[in-house]
Amino acid sequence: MTYYAGIDVGSTTSKVVVLTDNGRVEAYSVLRNSYNLAESGKKAFQMALDKKGLSENDIAYIIATGYGRRTIEFQHEVEPEIICHARGTMELVPTCRTIIDIGGQDSKIIELDENGVKKFQMNDKCAAGTGRYLDKLAKGILGIEVKQLGELSLKSNSPISISSQCTIFAESEIINYLSYREPIENIAAGMHYSLVRRVIQMGKAANIGFKKDIVFSGGVAKNTGMVKALEDLLGEQIIVPEDPQSTAALGVALMARERGAQ
Amino acid sequence: MTKKKDWHREYLVRCAGFGDPPWDKELDEMLEKWRKAAEKLGLTEEEVKYAVTEWIPSNYDIGLEGVRKTIGVMTAEATDMMMATERKARGEKMVYGVLPAHTPFYRAFKFTDPSVNVYFVDANFISFVQPLFHKIAPHLDYAEERGVRYGCRHCALNKTRYALLRQGLVPLPDVSWIWGFICDQAPKSDEFIKEYWNSEYPIIFSRWSHHGRAFEKEYQNVEMVKYLASVMREGYEQVCKVLGIEVDENAIVKALEERMDFMLKYAELSKLMAADPPPIAGEIPLLLAHGLWAVFNTGYVYYSDALDATLKDAKTKIAKGEGVVPKGSPRGMMWFMPFCNPFILRMFEENGVAIPFCEGLLPSKAELEPPKFEDPFEANAEAFLKECMITNWGNKAELTLERLETYDIDFMIWGFEDFDRWLGSDQKLCQAYVEKKIEKPCFYIEGDIWEDRDYSEEAMRVRIETICEVVKARLAATI
C-alpha cells in the first residue's frame, strides 16, 4: 500500500492526515504546538504514523501547509493554507461556497466557486477575531475552560454587548459587567457574538457575500456557541465538518496524493 | 593589507548609476554631496553596506542600467534635498508641495526664477529612504512620539513631512502650497504642524471640491474645469507674491508641455511592460512615474536619462525573450503598487507571477491627448482632472476595465491604502464594480504602500502566495 501525508503546522496546533492511494483517510492526528514548530509538526506526523504502525518510509509524498510549513524538513512541497482549506472543505462539502475558518491565532473567510478559491480575507494585526480572544477571556476573566464556553453561552437569553475591536478592551468591559453581577452565560454569549461580528465585518469588507453552503472550520468551530452566533447573525445554516481542524491537512494530503501519484 | 571599501562610493557606482556614462563624470562631486546627505540622514556606513550588498541586490535587478539610474534619480533628489538647509541659509527660496498637487506649477516657479527650489519633501524622501534603505520607520516613530498618534494611522507622507521639518532635515520653506485630496489629510496635517509645532510654518491651501458624480468625466465639465482653474490661479498668485516673482503664463505653458513630453515617453515604457514576459520589475516604471506626480528640484535631467536607459533595457530584454518571470506566467495589475516595500513584488515574482502595471499611475488615453483649453490654468485644470488618481471612483473602475483589456492583464489587486479610509473605500467600490463586470480574479490586500511596520514580509507572505496559487489555478481552469 502507498500512503500520502498532508501536514498543517498552524499557529496553535499541528494536524496531520495520512491517505491511502485510493483516497481513504488512514490516520489523523492533532497536537498542540510548542514554540518549536518543526518539532511539533514532526511529532504530529509521528503520532499519525504510530496510530497505524507506519514509518516515514511508507509515505510516498508529503506536502506541508500552515504558518510553520517551511519548518518541516521532510516535506516534498509546501502550499499556502487557504488553498488547502478550500481543497479539503470541498472534498467534504462539495456544495460549499463560503468557508469561515477560525483558528487559534487567525481567521479566514474564503469564497469559493466551482473552480476553487475566488477570493479570501484574513484578519490582520489583532487577535480579536480569533480563538485566542475566547481563550484569553474564558481563562483570564471568567475562570472557566474555553471548551465550557459554548455550552454555557447557549443558556443565555440576553447576551451582553461587547465591543469587537480589541481583546484587551473587551476584557475591561467584561470586568465592568461582572461588577454589575451580569450572569456569566450572558457574558459568554456576548463574547461569541462579538467575535462573530468582527469576522463577518472582515469578510464583508472584502466584498465576500457569505453565499451558501457555509462551512465553519478551525478549532473554534467545535464551539457550539460560536455556531449559534454565526447562524443568528448570518441568518443561514452553518455546516461544521466532523473534524473541523482537519480540513487544511486533508486538503494538502489530497494534493500530496495527486502529485505523488504523477 | 587590503584597502577598506568605501561603501558610499560603492553605492553610487554599483546601485545608483554614477558609474555609468555620462553620470560617471559627476561621481566625485556627487560622492562628496552624498556623504554629507547620508550623514544628515543618519545612514551609517554599515547600513549603506547592507543596502549595497544585500537589500538592493535582493530586491532590484541592478545589473540593468535603467534600474541603477532610476535608483540614481531618487538618490540625487534626496541628496539635493538634504542640502536645502544650507541653500536656504544662503537666501535661496523654497516652495514645498504635497501630493496630489499638480506638478507643472512648481516647475513654472523654477522656470520663472531658477533660484527657487521646489520639493515634494515627503514623497521624495520616503520613496528614497524606504525602498532603498528600508529606513522610514524611525522618522514615522519620531512624528508619532510628537503628536501624530499612532492609533489614528494617518498617511506616512504627512508624518514624514512633519518629522523632516521638526528634525531640521529640511528647512522651513518660504511657502508650503498644499492641495486637498479626497482625504484632505495633507491640509489638515499642515494645519496641525503649524498650530502644534511651529506657528511660523507658512501654508497656502488650494482645496477643491471632490464632489464629482461617479462616472462623470470631470475634465469635460467646463464649469468644473473653470472653477478648478480659478482655485489654481488664486493659489499660484499667492505663492508668486510670497516668492516675489511675477505670474509668468509662458512658464506655466512650458512646464505643462515638459510634463506632457515626459508622459508620452513614459507611455512608451507602459506599452513595453505589456510584453510576455514583462521585461523589468513593475516598481521601476512606478519610481520613474514620480516624474509625473512629484516635483524634483533636480528637474528632468537625471529622469530623462534614467527613462531612456530603462526603455533600452526593456527593448533588449524583449528582443531576447527575457523577463522577470517565465513566458506565459500570470500578469497582474495593482491599483497602487507598494513600491516602498519592494519585497512584495519580489514575493509575487518568486511565486511565478508578475505585476508589471500600477494602475493609478498609468497614463490614460485622455491624458495623452493635448489639452482642449487654451488658458494655461484651465489647461492645467483639465490635465489634473484627467489623472487616474484624481478622478471619481466610477471612472477609476472604468479605466481599470479598459486597461485589463488593453494590456491583456490576468488579474487585479486593490489595497495597500489601509492608512486612509477615503482612499480605501474608493478602492473597495472599484473592486465591487469591476468584479461584477469581468470574470478575472480580483483581490483586495490590506496593507500600506509606504511602510511595513504593520505588514511585514512574513505577514504578507500567506496572502501573496495564496493569490499566486489562486491565479494560476483559475487561469489553468479557463484554458
Image (cartoon, coloured by chain):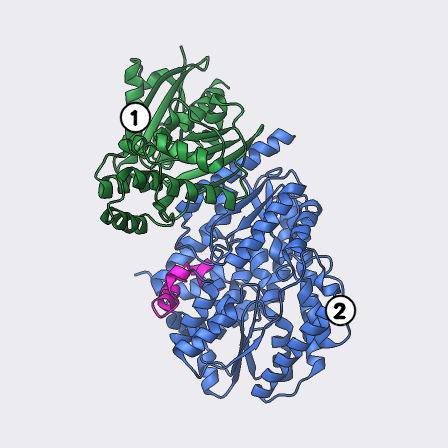
Chain colours: A green, B blue
Toward which corner of the image does residue B133 lie, by quadrant?
Answer: bottom left
Q: Which residues are magenta?
A: B128-152
Q: Note whether B91 is above or below B150 in the view shown.
A: below
Task: Tell me if mark 1 has few (under 14), some (14-19) or many (20+) residues whose alpha carbon lies within 10 angstroms of its own.
Answer: many
- Subunit ID for the residue under disc 1: A
Q: Residue at x 69, y 84 (%)?
A: B248
Asked if residue B148 is among those painted magenta in the image, a careful observer would answer yes
**Image location of residue B472, percent across then percent down:** 56, 35
Query: Residue A246 or B324: which is nearer the viewer?
Result: A246
Toward which corner of the image does residue A104 lie, by quadrant?
Answer: top left
* Residue closest to the far left: A143
Q: Residue at x 63, y 76 (%)?
A: B105
Query: Residue B263 or A156: which is nearer the viewer?
Result: A156
Q: Note whether B210 is above or below B356 in the view shown.
A: below
Measure the alpha-carbon separation of dots 1 and 2.
69 Å
Residue B124 appearing in the image: no
Query: Residue B366 or A218: which is nearer the viewer?
Result: A218
- Subunit ID for the residue under disc 2: B
SS under mark 1: helix
**Image location of residue B98, percent across then percent down:** 54, 70
- The disc at residue A227 is none
Which residue does the numbered mark 2 point to in the structure image?
B222
Asked if residue B64 is among those painted magenta in the image, a careful observer would answer no
User: Which quadrant of the figure contains the C terminus of chain B?
Assistant: top right
Which residue does the numbered mark 1 point to in the structure image?
A44
Residue A190 appearing in the image: yes
